[in-house]
């Protein structure tokens, strides 16, 4: 294997489009020292609040903090949350010229109330109806323009089932990227039993992989490469979707990589030293894996880099992004 750190130096050369369900992750921080007299719930005394790009927007944020350029393609609502998300993406350095405003729905917002570091409740504001076909058309057109101009080197699809994707639209964007010689990676949603062809990579987690493969969920039974159900699920997904690579993330057990051109899957155990908050770890895996592949890493190397990155972000509270310097520190210590 090459020195994994060398690939990180290549990241700033690339511009990547993220198309999918954009969200705003809001955090309300405070202290809880008493129970409400009104109902058996804690009273949180607010000390501060913050907001960061979430969902597909968090993948864009990860790409940017890894040193790449990012084009965010998706919809926000015609509301203050949408404007805040637009501003946050812009501040992070994303190209927001392909954002569309959907006046039929609110911006998707996930608000977490935290007392100390403990999440007390999450409040979701969203409309999961299918996007109007005119809006899908606009998203496709902006993407197509960028692809045809040669401005994009990879396309990431982030499906959180909030209305952006149906099978036809996903296949259309994938075909469009392929025509431009650009590879597409997908973080799939388990409710979307599609079979889109032409993907370079899919990154479901364990539960998502079982659902997508139509198999009843089985928790892990120790060694992933001896986990017959997991291997069967991997084989089904490789067969139905035919991606070149399938990376099933396994939470505390790391990840398993399936390659169309390799007979045996490859397991990477977790790199995490401390675990505070696993939300957003999947987004970090997607951003880092895509960048590493672009930089010329072989799939096993790319998965090791992604696994190291995820091992860092699970140690942060809240939706977090990995930065190139921290990742370099983690990788250089091990390679
Ligand atoms: N409890 C944990 N301990 C150590 N590492 C973890 C843990 N949870 C997640 N990770 C790391 O993060 C990666 C992705 O995690 P996971 O499989 O939970 O993805 P996910 O469910 O898609 O995450 P997300 O919450 O972002 O959707 C794992 O492959 C692993 O490297
Ligand atoms: Mg995920």
Image (cartoon, rainbow, N blue to C red):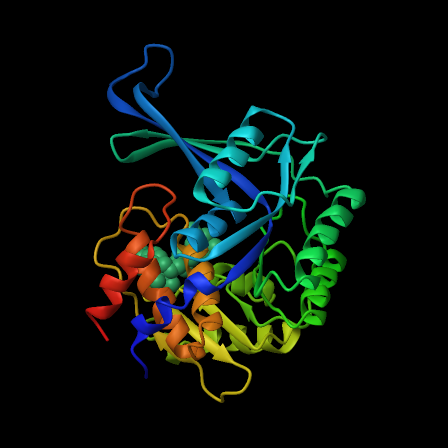
Q: Nearer the viewer, residue 186 or 10?
A: 10
Residue at 47%, 40% in the rendered image: 53
Q: Quadrant of the C terminus?
A: bottom left
Mark count: 0
Q: Quadrant of the N terminus?
A: bottom left
Which residue in the rendered view is the most extreme toward the left?
333
Residue at 75%, 52% in the rendered image: 141
Q: Position of residue 284 (x, y in %)?
A: 41, 56
Left or right: residue 206 compared with residue 328: right
Q: Position of residue 38 (x, y in %)?
A: 37, 11
Q: Is residue 8 visible?
A: yes
Residue at 54%, 87% in the rendered image: 261
Height in image: 328 above or below 52?
below
Which residue in the rendered view is the most extreme toward the bottom?
263
Left or right: residue 76 compared with residue 309: right
Q: Position of residue 85 (x, y in %)?
A: 52, 35
Height in image: 33 above or below 20?
above
Height in image: 122 above or below 163?
above
Q: Nearer the viewer, residue 128 or 147?
A: 147
The image quarter containing residue 327 is bottom left
Q: Nearer the viewer, residue 139 or 147?
A: 147
Residue at 49%, 50% in the rendered image: 60
The image quarter containing residue 144 is bottom right
Q: Position of residue 87 (x, y in %)?
A: 50, 33
Which residue in the rendered view is the most extreme toward the top?
37
Left or right: residue 207 compared with residue 173: left
Q: Is residue 194 visible?
A: no
């Amino acid at each position: 294997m090459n020195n994994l750190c060398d690939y990180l130096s290549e990241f700033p050369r690339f511009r990547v489009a993220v198309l999918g369900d954009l969200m705003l992750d809001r955090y309300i921080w405070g202290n809880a020292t008493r129970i409400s007299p009104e109902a058996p719930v804690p009273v949180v005394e607010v000390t501060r609040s913050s907001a960061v790009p979430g969902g597909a927007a968090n993948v864009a944020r990860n790409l940017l903090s890894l040193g790449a350029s990012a084009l965010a393609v998706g919809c926000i609502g015609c509301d203050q949350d949408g404007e805040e998300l637009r501003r946050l993406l812009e501040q992070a350095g994303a190209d927001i010229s392909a954002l569309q405003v959907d006046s039929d729905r609110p911006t998707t917002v996930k608000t977490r109330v935290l007392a100390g570091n403990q999440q007390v409740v999450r409040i979701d504001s969203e409309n999961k109806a299918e996007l109007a076909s005119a809006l899908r058309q606009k998203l496709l057109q902006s993407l197509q323009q960028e692809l045809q101009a040669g401005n994009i080197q990879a396309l990431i699809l982030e499906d959180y089932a909030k209305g952006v994707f149906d099978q036809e639209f996903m296949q259309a964007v994938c075909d469009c990227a392929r025509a431009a010689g650009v590879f597409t990676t997908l973080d799939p949603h388990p409710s979307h039993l599609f079979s889109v062809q032409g993907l370079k990579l899919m990154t479901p987690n364990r539960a998502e992989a079982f659902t997508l493969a139509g198999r009843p969920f089985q928790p892990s039974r120790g060694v992933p490469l001896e986990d017959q159900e997991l291997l069967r699920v991997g084989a089904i997904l490789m067969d139905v979707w035919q991606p070149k690579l399938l990376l099933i993330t396994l939470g505390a057990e790391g990840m398993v990589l399936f390659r169309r051109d390799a007979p045996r899957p490859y397991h990477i155990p977790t790199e995490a030293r401390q675990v505070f908050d696993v939300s957003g770890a999947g987004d970090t895996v997607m951003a880092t894996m895509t960048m590493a592949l672009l930089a010329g890493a072989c799939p096993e190397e790319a998965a090791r880099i992604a696994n190291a990155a995820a091992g860092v972000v699970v140690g942060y509270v809240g939706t977090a992004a990995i930065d190139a310097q921290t990742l370099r520190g983690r990788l250089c210590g091990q390679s």
